[in-house]
Amino acid sequence: MSDPRLLAHFERLHADSIDPWGYDTRWYEARKRALTLAMLPRQRYRHGFEPGCSIGALSAELIQRCDAFTGWDASPSAVASARRRLGHLDNARFEQRTLPTALPASTFDLIVFSEVGYYLQEPALVATIYNLQRALRPSGDLIACHWRHPLQDGYRSGDDVHERLHDCLELHAVSSLVERDFRIDLWSRDALDVGRWEALK
């Protein structure tokens, strides 16, 4: 997200409120996080990555399933909030970075692309998708979650973001959950399902 107008907008939101979207207070947000976590096929990951981590509400639960975790956000105030919440954890790191300008220096076996794709214009969204795919390790998983209704400050719908992901990613489409308000899609480099991983009959 390199649009100066949007960068300033999100910095104001995070500077003026400790929880701009009610991540910690709304059942909608808690349920959406639970569904996102439930769709992840692996019980644990070596290194998780969440660009657009905001105040770290989802990060807090992802960290419990990751040996190491990296969260990015374009807003300095958001990063400061995430660090206050989770910076005491040895396996967590939060950085102020802007998509798609910044490129991950590491590779990850879990990438969570949640509620950020609509704020990227077409060239930036496509570049981000390809950069995320390059950062995904063999047998890694990429999960995306987005709101489906129109956004006043976004460039596209959540459905459009997921269509672009389907078009650009050279990964296996593993599972999808589509509700009236949001959708979650999971892709993986590994086509095996959980039952086959655990040798279930």
Image (cartoon, helix red, strand yellow):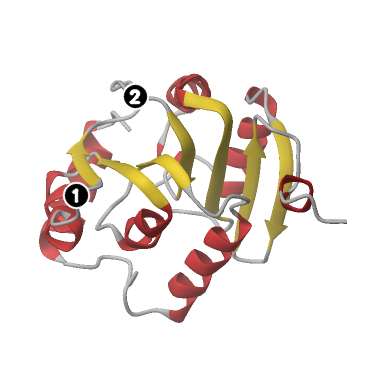
Q: Quadrant of residue 25?
A: bottom left
**Residue 157 in view (yes/no):** no
Q: Is residue 47 left or right of residue 8?
A: right
Number of numbered discs on residues? 2
Query: Is 144 or 159 nearer to us in this picture?
Result: 144
Q: Quadrant of residue 97?
A: top left
Residue 30 lies, with reference to residue 96, above or below; the image says below
- Graded by Cα atoms within 10 Å as few (under 14), some (14 to 19) or many (20 or more), the crowding at tag 1 reads few
Residue assigned mark 2: 106
SS under mark 1: loop
Residue 89 lies, with reference to residue 188, above or below; the image says below
Residue assigned mark 1: 90
Q: Is residue 71 left or right of residue 113?
A: left
**Residue 141 in view (yes/no):** yes
Mark 1 or 2: in front is 1
Percent coordinates x, y for residue 28 in the rendering: 49, 75
Lower sequence index among marks 1 and 2: 1
- Graded by Cα atoms within 10 Å as few (under 14), some (14 to 19) or many (20 or more), the crowding at tag 2 reads few
Alpha carbon separation for disc pair 1 and 2: 17 Å
The N terminus is located in which quarter?
top left
SS under mark 2: loop
